[in-house]
Image (tube, rainbow, N blue to C red):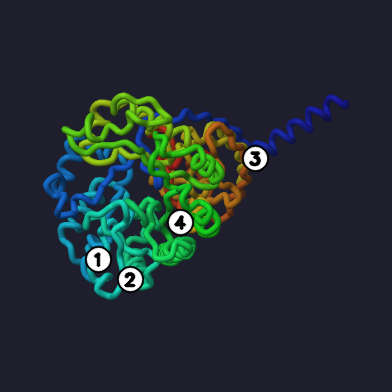
Amino acid sequence: MKFYYILVLSSILFSLSCCNNYKTVSVSFKPDTVSVLRNPAMGWVMYEEGWSFMKSHQKWYDPVKFWEEMDEVQAHEYANILYIRVLWNVLEPEEGRYAWIYDEEYKAYIQKAKERGLKLAFRVFFDNGVPDFVYEAGAHSTLEPPLSRVEDKMPYFDDPVFLEKLSNFIAAFAKEYDNPDVVDFVDAYGLGRWGEGHGVTLKDNARLPDVIEKVTGEYARHFKRVLTVMNLSYADWEYTKPLVFDRLGFLPRRDGVGSFWFSDEERNYLNELFPQKAHIGEGCYWFAFPHKDTTVYDAFKQDKRFKMDNFSEAFTVVVDDALATHSNTLDLRVPYQCKYWIEKLPEQVQRFVTHGGYRLYPQTIKVEQQGRRILISHEWLNMGVGVLPNRHPNWNHKYKLCFSLLDPATKNIKYSMVETNIEPADWVKGQAHIYKTDISIPEELHKGDYLLCVGIVDTTKGDIPGINLSLPVDKLIDDWAYISKVNI
């Protein structure tokens, strides 16, 4: 009799589970380790030195020749970003007359970047590049010793007229370019030699922290959506750490990766910021013209940290160092150097594609369904050395994990649920991140078959995937990772 009741009870439970549509599915994913991922704030960077817009340099490059040479090697197929290092007087030659409105040559140049699927990034700097109207309004300048040439003219960066005019420019600059669909990041400082933060000329050296706070504060006040970064340097770390990286949440950028100029002290600073902040990296040694690739620009031979005898070794070292310092970005740089990278060092280009920045993907997903309740166990990995800079205040954690149900025929989203308590910025290489998600499908969703998927969405744009996962295309449906079919 006892055995009979057990059989009856088992039969009832089995019937209930069938009626409640109980189902278990486990899926494993293998990552795509080869493709260039078109994700924000990561990857290879093409570089505009500003020469295309400087009359003195147009014997080498102009806006047309720049793109002709980049296109010869299809550089945009490897790069995600065009970094434009440009003088202030190029973007605002006359007060209120901005290049993005009035300069047809500049506008055509920018349009070509957009047509090639590149995001923009900017550094506005000042080496003999302050517009004349700033000095005409009363700002003062100096020829910085030991420099004595007129072309090395620098402003006093603490001059109140200079700061006032710069603030006006930053406001207009942000009005045009504070758009994350167009711009990846902006160097929100740009003072000193080459805009790198050293050699800042001041009337009163004691005012350096005030100037840093003023300029970065203006950028932070006007750029509310695009990532703001600042060059990390021992020269001003005691001020930038509390005022800029901590208070304003800027990301660190470091020019000089792959060299002794990037000191142990600065590497320790960078380690203090990682993984809370992504590293925007740039290589040190570079060249721009065929006849200078082994002579004038061979300073790497005197490097005190790394042994390098030629550019192939120097560029291999920079990839090594970029990966060791968790770089989200690295520079293919100017057209001739892009050609060198792509044609002579394709394995190094691929190495940074595979390991640089962030490459996020689900490793395993287990789905347990009972009727309209779906319990999902999921494990996520980052195979890149960098991180998604989701903590930057201008992003404000906008990228979130999202599960969706798609119509099998149309692939339209019929239901989605954003996981508000999961932070993709936590995903660091070498760590598995395991979660459980409990979904209750609302009664309003009609019964039927659906495709259960997962992705990382930009919550400022709704339930559309905003981050490309590192998965083969046959595992994706409109940038969603396909998990399994479910019946509601």
Amino acid type assigned to the residue bearing label 2 in the image: Lys
- Determine whether, in the image, residue 404 is placed left or right of residue 114: right
Pick whichever of labels 3 and 4 is earlier in the sequence.
3
- Determine whether, in the image, residue 421 is placed left or right of residue 450: right
- Distance from the alpha carbon under mark 3 to that under mark 4: 35 Å
The quarter of the image holding the C terminus is top right
Residue corresponding to mark 1: 131
**Residue 340's spot in the image, x, y percent?**
24, 31
Residue corresponding to mark 4: 462
**Residue 283's spot in the image, x, y percent?**
36, 38
Amino acid type assigned to the residue bearing label 4 in the image: Gly
Q: Do the residues bearing badges 4 and 2 touch, measured as CB atoms within 8 Å?
A: no
Residue 333 visible in this rendered orientation of the protein? yes
Name the residue at the left extreme.
59
- Distance from the alpha carbon under mark 2 to that under mark 1: 10 Å
Q: Residue at x 41, y 40 (%)?
A: 477
Q: Do the residues bearing badges 2 and 1 touch, measured as CB atoms within 8 Å?
A: yes
Amino acid type assigned to the residue bearing label 3 in the image: Cys
